[in-house]
Image (cartoon, rainbow, N blue to C red):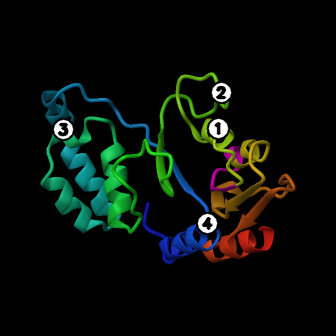
Amino acid sequence: MPKIDGAIEILNKIKNLFNLKVFIFTYRDWPQLKNEENCIKRGWKENINNYYSRLGLNNLIKRIETLDYYIFKKNIDKITRLWLFENGIKFPRSFKRHNNDVKLIIEKGNEEVSELRAMFKNRFYESIKNNIRFFVEDDLRKAIKLSYICDFIFLFDQPYNQEDNLPNNVFRLKSWEEIYRKIRELI
């Protein structure tokens, strides 16, 4: 997705002023390619180059062209991390430390399950486990489900998530600045 102007600055402001940890969730369904031969047959580099070219991310394309298949071995994880880094979201290489103030979670498996005994991690599982209070979501269905787990959900207003009947703790907001103001109001 193209970067939203001002999002990084507001996210850092939220993190620093309110002393909050930031969890970034993304679901990336990308084919597992077993070896380089399969990669070449499927044209992985060309597909990625075309995708980022359409988004106007030429700087990222140059970085991808210098990488080999090994970087993409774990699905699209590395591309996601690279995109976030290139767009100003910095986080430590080690995500296993609990004191990180920014954590990236690339969801695997079935994103619909919130059962704590599940063998995979998703936004629902992590929200329960980490007692996440505020959640920014753009998927209406997920926002409603998260409203049972988190204190407040900020539904980022999009043409595909329009519905008037939202739970009381789901707020439809149009910008990161509005999200910042709402958190400030709620704290």
Q: Residue at x 39, y 62 (%)?
A: 90
Magenta-colored stretch includes residue 151: no
Q: Are marks 1 and 2 in contact (CB under 8 Å)?
A: yes
Kind of residue indicated by mark 1: Lys
Relative vertical location of residue 68 with respect to residue 92 in this rendering, above or below? above
The residue depicted at 85 percent of the width and 52 percent of the height is 167
Where in the figure is residue 49, as x and y percent of width and height? 23, 54
Q: Which residues are magenta?
A: 134-142
Say which label, 1 or 3, has the lower sequence index: 3
**Where is 5 relative to 102, above or below?**
below
Task: Tell me the tag on residue 19.
Answer: 4
Closer to viewer: mark 1 or mark 3: 1
Reading the image, the residue beneath label 3 is: 70
Three-letter residue code for mark 3: Tyr
Instruction: Report whether 67 appears left or right of 125.
Output: left
Compared to residue 180, the image places residue 135 above or below, namely above
* Real-space Cα separation, disc 4 to disc 2, in angstroms: 27 Å
Looking at the picture, how far across and down is residue 58, in whole percent?
A: 24, 67
Indicate which disc, 4 or 2, sits on the residue closer to the N terminus: 4
